[in-house]
Amino acid sequence: MAPSTSARIPGYPFSSIEPLKEAVRVRLAPSPTGNLHLGTARTALYNYLYAHRKGGTFIVRLEDTDDERSEDHYTVDIIEGLKWLGLTWDEGPDIGGPYGPYKQSQKFDHYAQMANQLVTKGSAYHCYATPEELIALKEEQKNSGKPPRYDNRGRDLAQIQIDEFVKEGRAPSIRFMIEEPRIIAWHDHIKGEIGIETGDLGGDMVIVKSNGMATYNFAVVIDDIDMKMTHVIRGEDHIHNTAKQLLLYEALGIKPPEFAHAALIFDTERHKLSKRKHGEAAHISQYRIGGYMPEAMVNYLTQMSWTPADGREIFTLAEACEMFDLEKVSKSPAVFDIKRLNWFNSHYLRSLPIKTVTERALPYLTNVNISAYTNAQLEEIVASVRDGLTILSEVLGATRFYFEKELPVEEDLKKTVLSNGSSRKVIDNTLKVLPSFPWGDHKGCKSVVDGMGKELGLKGKELYWPLRVALSGKVQGPDLGSIISILGAERVKLRLQSALPHCGAS
Ligand code: GLU
């Protein structure tokens, strides 16, 4: 196992500190600029699991520094998604805690104050470059085939030049000086040893914009310090940000947290899972609303890049909390495969308590009269179809026939099944034995049909299909005994009677 050392930067004053002794504090820091992404949900899971495994604290902090793209409905979606997954936080947007409630937009003055400290220390400076100048610089670099970066032109401005800019009414941003060349190295709990060249960080970075708002890379460091984060677990798209952030910790003279970067999630064709490419399919809400079980999503996302030591595939969130090992999370990209998620979902649809599945199924039973059945019967209805469901939203199609007053039977089935001579015999005789069905006993109801079949010398399709078509409108579906038992004497009688006119002569 990798040593539990702090992040290490060559020459960094805290590079030799002992393993962290303080209690684990981790956070999910989503930006409310989009709905809860599958990748963010997986990051949330890793943080939650790590906190629970270590007896630590899991925090949710909304990173709403991007005022143009942050929207309240995204915050609602993120919170609902996390709650749906069962990833409750110990401190966060609605429950506060010693350092909360957490919303970065409430702390802009604090960030500005901290940035000014860096200016006073000489590690940051006011930059007067206008957006037009920066665009022109980018253009120039593009035309000469160079990667875009700030050229640090504002570092050593003469006072006379600064006065000139102020007179022009230019509002300065604050830029943090990035020393080049230098390698920022750290031990990553997932990726192992990482080294980033400061020359690849895009030049001196803006930490406070000209409108006074802190940028992500600065606010995140100040918040992680203020909230006493011990570990930062996030996606590997933040690896370069981590290098920048480690430089900020160094300049502030504060011990950085430890870092773990999880590989990104790709689709089965190796495209990064993104809203642009995959639309809503990249978001948790699509699955939450579409009839997936949160237990399946949690299990699927967790095992995507991590397998418990005993190799098991199926586990609950609580079980994962007991077994999770951050060091064993895979370094390679994860693949999101809907077929596999569906496999997990079918498993949980079949195995969760029927009461739970029924409660979750009810919102999907729209435009049908569910009050025609008792709660216990509704559970029987859902139980009768759940083995055939992949997602819960299919429950309406699978159970609609139970609720229908007049059962529409496809013309095709009337011709192929009911018109058959033995169908009339089966239906006539079922009406005769109707009083002997033990209603409520699914197996018993099936036995009555089988007993009748024996007497008529009919079995298999010849016996069952006419009844299935008459009672459910289909040849496939739940067990016939369940259909009969759940529908009950009255409905069975009516349906059989209305099927008779379509039956051939016996
Ligand atoms: N707000 C960042 C994001 O949504 C979080 C990065 C971090 O965890 O520091 O990507």
Image: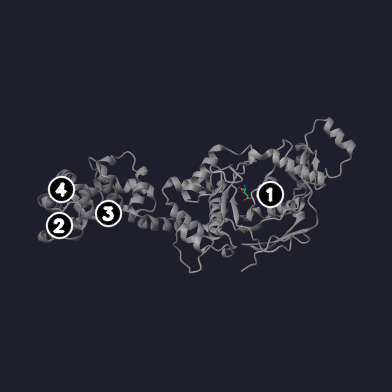
Q: Amino acid at mark 2?
A: Val
Indicate whether 12 appears above or below 37: below
Q: Are marks 4 and 2 in contact (CB under 8 Å)?
A: no
Q: Of circles 2 and 1, which is in front?
A: 1
User: Is 108 displayed left or right of 94 in the figure?
Assistant: right
Residue identifier under label 4: 503
Image spot of residue 71 (x, y percent): 57, 37
Circle nearer the N terminus (2, 1): 1
Q: Alpha carbon of mark 2 to alpha carbon of mark 3: how far?
A: 17 Å
Tell me residue 413's x, y (percent). 23, 49
Tell me: residue 393, above or below residue 447. Answer: above
- Quarter where residue 24 is shown: bottom right
Which residue lies under the disc numbered 1?
221
Q: Secondary structure at mark 3?
A: loop
Q: Which amino acid is tagged 4?
A: Cys
Alpha carbon of mark 4 to alpha carbon of mark 3: how far?
23 Å
Kindly indicate whether the residue at mark 3 contacts the one at mark 1 (C-beta within 8 angstroms). Answer: no
Q: Which residue is mark 2?
A: 448
- Residue type at mark 3: give it: Pro
Q: Which quadrant of the structure image shows residue 69?
A: top right
Q: Position of residue 161 (x, y in %)?
A: 88, 37
Secondary structure type for disc 1: helix
3D distance between C-alphas at marks 2 and 1: 72 Å
